[in-house]
Amino acid sequence: MSISRRRIIQSLPALVCSAGLGMIGQAKGAQVFTMQATTSASDDLDIEWLTLLKQGTERASGGRIKVNVYPASQLGSTQTMIEGVVMGTLEIAVNASGTYEGLDPRFAALAVPGIIRSMTQGASVLTDADVRRRLGLIARDKDVEVITALTHSPVGIVSRRPITRLTDLKGMKIRVPGSALIIEQLKTLGASPVAMSLGEVLPAFQNGTIDGVYAGTTIFSALKYFDVAKNLTLLPETFIVIVALANSAFMKSLGSLEAVVRDQARKADITGAAWGEADVTKERGVWESNGGHTLTLPAADAKLYLDTVVPAALRHLTADARADYDALKAVSAKYS
C-alpha cells in the first residue's frame, strides 16, 4: 500500500469530524487534548489495550487528556486509519503489523514465523528494551511512531476440508490479510492466497468463494466461524502481532504529558498481554464447545513448514527489514 497525497485528501471528509475535537481543544489554549484512537477489531486485545490506555491516561493526566476509542472500523477502513495517523487527523490506530507494510516494509519482519513461539515468550520478546528501541524507529520518517507491539494470538487456518498435512494446502484458496509477505509464504506452500479484509471474509467463506481463512485464532470463535466449518489447523510458531501507531507531531504537542501517555502505554502492555493470553485460552474453549476441532501438523510437517516459509519470507524482506528480523531472532533466542 502506498499512500498518495490525493488519497489522503480524499479521506479527509470521513475523518474531519473525529479530528475536530482535538484541534478545537488545543486552539482554546486550555491544555486539554483529545486523542482519537481506533482499530478494526471489537471485543479483542486491540480494544482491551486501547481501553486500558484510555483509563490510565485520563486518570494520570488529571483529565487533561481525553481519549475517545472507536472500535470495529468506525472511522473507516484500515487504510483510512493509517492515512489518518500519517496526516494527524487521527492520533492512534491499532492493527495487525502486516497492514502497515505499505507504509514501511520494515513492518514485515514481525510476520516472519519462528520469532514468537508462545504468547508468554512473545510478550517477553516485544517488551525487550532493544526491540522497543528498534520498533520505535520504524516509519519515523512518515511522521508516525510505534508506541506498542503486542502478541495477539496464534495463527490458524479454518477450512471445511481438514488440513492435517502440508500437502492438503495445495490448490486451496485461502483468505489472508493484505500482507505481501504472508501471501508469498502461502504461495510457497502451494496454496492460492486471496487478500481480503476481515469484513468481507465470512460471506465469501459461506458461499465457497474461498476454501479457508488465515487469521488469529481468537477471530474464529468470536465471529462464529464454527457455523461454517469445524476444522482449525494451527500453524507452527506463527503469531499475529498488533501494532499501535501514533502521530509523532501530536505526541510532541503534549509537552510534559507525553511521558504520561508513554508510561500508560507500557502499563497497558503488561495488563494487556495477560488479558490476551487468557483470551486465547477462552476463545479456544468456545471454539471446541461449539463442535470445532483444533488440529496440529505432525512434527515432520511442522519442521517442513518452518523450513519452507521462513526462507520464502526472508527473500521478501528489504535489507532494513532483514536487519530487524535478525535482531528480533536474536532476542527471541534469549527468551526461549
Image (spheres, rainbow, N blue to C red):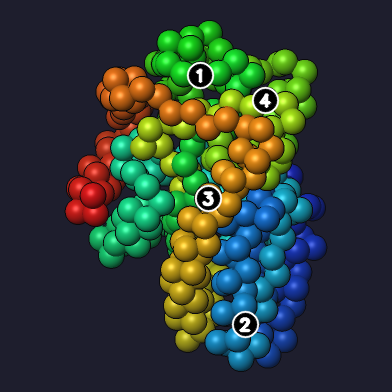
Residue pointed to by mark 1 = 163
User: Which of the pair 135/256 is nearer the observer?
Assistant: 135
Task: Measure how far apart labels 1 and 3 are at the Cα level.
Answer: 22 Å
Task: Measure how far apart labels 4 and 1 are at the Cα level.
Answer: 12 Å
Task: Measure how far apart labels 3 and 2 are at the Cα level.
Answer: 31 Å
Q: How crowded is mark 1: few (under 14 residues within 10 Å), some or many (20 or more)?
A: many
Q: How crowded is mark 4: few (under 14 residues within 10 Å), some or many (20 or more)?
A: many
On-image quarter of the N terminus = top right
In contact (CB < 8 Å): disc 4 and disc 2: no
Percent across and percent down for residue 71 are 71, 56
In contact (CB < 8 Å): disc 1 and disc 3: no
Q: What residue type is labelled 3?
A: Thr
Say which residue appears at 62% left-offset and 74% top-offset: 54
Task: Measure how far apart labels 4 and 2 are at the Cα level.
Answer: 43 Å
Q: Can residue 318 be seen in this view?
A: yes
Q: Which amino acid does label 4 sit on?
A: Ala
Residue pointed to by mark 4 = 229
Q: In this view, does 167 lie above or below 287?
A: above
Q: Which amino acid does label 2 sit on?
A: Glu
Nearer the camera: disc 4 or disc 2: 4
* Disc number placed over residue 58 in the picture, else none: 2
Residue pointed to by mark 3 = 281
User: Which of the pair 188/275 is nearer the observer?
Assistant: 275
